[in-house]
Amino acid sequence: MEETFQAAEGLTGIDTRMAGRTMVTSAYLVGAREPTLIETGPTTSVEAVHAGLEALGMRAHDLAHIVVTHIHLDHAGGVGTLAARFPNATVWVHERGAPHLADPAKLVASATRVYGEDRLRELFGPVEPVPADRLRSIGEGDVIALGDRKLEVMYTPGHASHHVSLVDSLTGAVFTGDALGIHLPDVRVLRPATPPPDIDIEAGVESIERIRDRAETFLMFSHFGPVREVEELCSIAATRLRDWAGIVREAMEETDDLDRIAEMLTTRTASEFDEAPEGADLERYEVLSGMKMNASGLVRYWKKHQESEAAARR
């Protein structure tokens, strides 16, 4: 795939080349009077994103806004570094995520616990802070005005408690972040992404249904690119999220060993790849959201669920 690609009217995708691979994580340039970048990818992707923006005619003082759907490092890890290169850009993020972009120490510590120091450095690189005076907090129903079009904010928790999706006023497309999971265009298989610490199945399904109701034309996946099949993919996303949670709950009745639970989840969901093209690079799904990480998030979800039920009975 090319460095940049047409996603919809006035929307151009940028391949961030995350982990040195194509079609893993996409950023988007909204071609408005106030040009806007949605997602930055990690710091290891900054050169690719910067090159893409330059290829689209964006000079240092042209970019007006940067919006991230959530603060996980594959989506927003590079925002501090990129914001320094585009000094006029205001950075927009959910109100719960804003403090962690201003001071990413806790964000990095949390990610280190999940990935380990070496893998974190390899995949994401360092995380630079965003100056507090350039940050703007957003939540449900807020509107980011871009001059001749706007982005409406939907609060879509599930994958993360600070996750937002964005509705483009011109095309009716919805930027989904990770709310629906991962869908790589050359594989055409959608899989959930259920990392710790705050995956929430009920909230996730509700968010998927809200996106289904709002998306008029395209789903703009961060992993990866535009998709027209709104109804089909929203149905698959909701079903698989529930199914994966059920598999992990059953596995927890047999064992508390995370490796074994991840193995059971992998085995019981392997058929999802049955229709994938021969020779497709499926390892990208593991790079983005490995099965042990997915299992860990779902185990944590069920333990919190059990604790809430026990507290309600007391």
Image (spheres, rainbow, N blue to C red):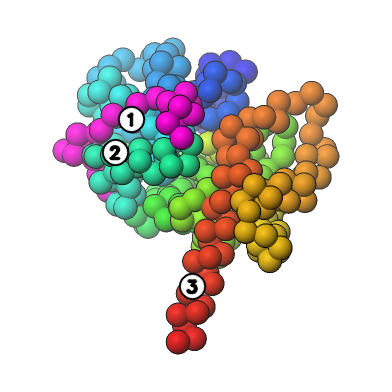
Eyeballing the image, is 36 above or below 70?
above
Amino acid at pointer 1: Val
Please name the residue that numbered disc 3 is placed on: 307
Amino acid at pointer 2: Pro
Of labels 2 and 1, earlier in sequence is 2
Residue 8 location, x and y as percent?
Answer: 55, 32
Q: Which of 305 and 231 is in front in this view?
A: 305
| Numbered badge on residue 127 | 1
- Kind of element beneath mark 2: loop
Tell me which residue sits at (64%, 38%) in the image: 183
Amino acid at pointer 3: Glu
Q: In this view, does 265 lie to the left or right of 43?
A: right
Tell me which residue sits at (45%, 27%) in the image: 118
Tell me which residue sits at (83%, 26%) in the image: 278
| Numbered badge on residue 104 | 2
Eyeballing the image, is 310 above or below 285?
below
Callout 2–callout 1 Cβ contact below 8 Å: yes
- Kind of element beneath mark 3: helix
- Say which of marks 3 and 2 sits in front: 3
The residue stretch that appears in magenta: 116-138
- Kind of element beneath mark 1: loop
Residue 227 location, x and y as percent?
Answer: 64, 38
Residue density around tag 1, few if under 14, some if 14–19, many if 20 or more, within 10 Å: many
